């Protein structure tokens, strides 16, 4: 029914499906049958998201969203496993088997096992035993690259590839992170939208900011430094520059950063 309507009428939103149910429609978090149908059609590849109005998604037929020259041939399970493996290798450079097959089903796991063996046999990936007895699969090309740890400072997204697996994050950086917007206010430790700070080659703390869009100002609510920073002047200079970029990203023109300035004055 939904597909037929989209095919006949064009772009459609969740709120357009059943206008009689005014109480819940229009809410992007609505979990009714309309939303479930949209998600199923999206996961099947029948619909794509062609636009977003804030948090609201606009759907259309896949063939009307994709360029005509796109190959729509369904990949084999093996080809899909190759694709996932390549993405993981590019994003992480080093990973365990558990991390490689995170949330993958059994048939796909079997295909990825074949791909992993091929990559190890070809010398593209090296299997390394680490101190805790686990096997770490490492990108050989990455091992040969010179590490530049002087690249400055970045405020990371909660969904950054380096953060998305908490166990991997803890083992690599000794840094335990979770975004606290889903945590009850009374139980928050670092702030509603605390974000990790990557300084050179270490995660050294987290910062909680809020974008006041009505006045186009980015406010620094809190800053938590959890590791000793050797060159504090350089750190705070880099943080100041990154906050300017972060403000621009959030469409803010100014930064209200009394917190960092106070901490800086105490060191």
Image (spheres, grey):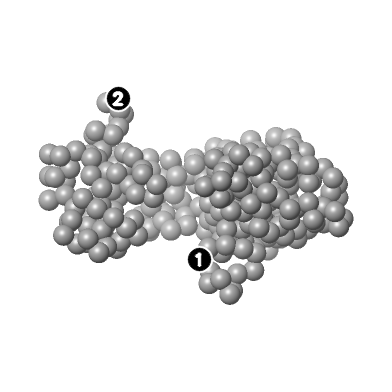
In front: label 1 or label 2: 1
Q: Residue at position x 84%, y 49% from top?
A: 232
> At which x and y percent is residue 246?
61, 43
Q: Report the Cα–Cα distance between label 1 and label 2.
A: 41 Å
Q: Residue furthest bottom?
A: 186
Q: Residue furthest front?
A: 215
Categorize mark 1 by other alpha carbons within 10 Å: few (<14), some (14-19), many (20+).
Answer: few
Specify the quadrant of the image occupied by residue 36.
bottom left
Between residues 27 and 99, which one lies in front from this camera angle?
Answer: 27
Between residues 133 and 185, which one lies in front from this camera angle?
Answer: 185
Element assignment for label 1: loop
For residue 69, the mark is 2
Tell me the residue that label 1 is attached to.
Answer: 182
Q: Residue at position x 40%, y 47% from top?
A: 54
Specify the quadrant of the image occupied by residue 7.
top left
Mark 1 or mark 2: which comes first in sequence?
Answer: 2
> At which x and y percent is residue 216?
56, 44
Categorize mark 2 by other alpha carbons within 10 Å: few (<14), some (14-19), many (20+).
Answer: few
Query: Taking 101 as reference, is 206 left or right?
Result: right
């Amino acid at each position: 029914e939904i597909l037929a309507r989209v095919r006949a009428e064009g772009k459609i939103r969740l709120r357009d499906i059943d206008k009689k149910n005014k109480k819940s429609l229009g809410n992007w978090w609505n979990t009714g049958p309309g939303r479930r149908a949209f998600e199923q059609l999206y996961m099947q590849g029948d619909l794509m998201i062609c636009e977003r109005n804030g948090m609201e998604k606009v759907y259309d037929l896949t063939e009307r969203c994709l360029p005509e020259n796109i190959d729509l041939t369904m990949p084999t399970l093996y080809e899909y496993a190759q694709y996932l493996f390549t993405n993981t290798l590019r994003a992480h450079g080093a990973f365990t088997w558990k991390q490689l097959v995170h949330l993958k089903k059994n048939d796909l796991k079997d295909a990825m096992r074949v791909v992993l063996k091929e990559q190890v046999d070809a010398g593209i990936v090296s299997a390394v035993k680490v101190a805790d007895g686990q096997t770490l699969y490492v990108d050989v090309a990455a091992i040969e690259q010179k590490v530049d740890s002087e690249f400055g400072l970045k405020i990371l997204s909660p969904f950054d590839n380096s953060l998305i697996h908490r166990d991997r994050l803890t083992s690599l950086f000794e840094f335990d992170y979770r975004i606290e917007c889903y945590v009850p206010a009374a139980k928050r430790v670092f702030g509603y939208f605390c974000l990790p700070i990557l300084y050179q080659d270490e995660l050294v703390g987290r910062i909680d900011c809020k974008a006041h869009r009505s006045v186009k100002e980015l406010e620094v609510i809190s800053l938590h430094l959890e590791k000793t920073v050797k060159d504090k002047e350089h750190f705070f200079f880099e943080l100041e520059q990154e906050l300017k970029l972060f403000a621009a990203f959030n469409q803010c023109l100014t930064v209200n950063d009394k917190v960092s300035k106070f901490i800086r004055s105490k060191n």
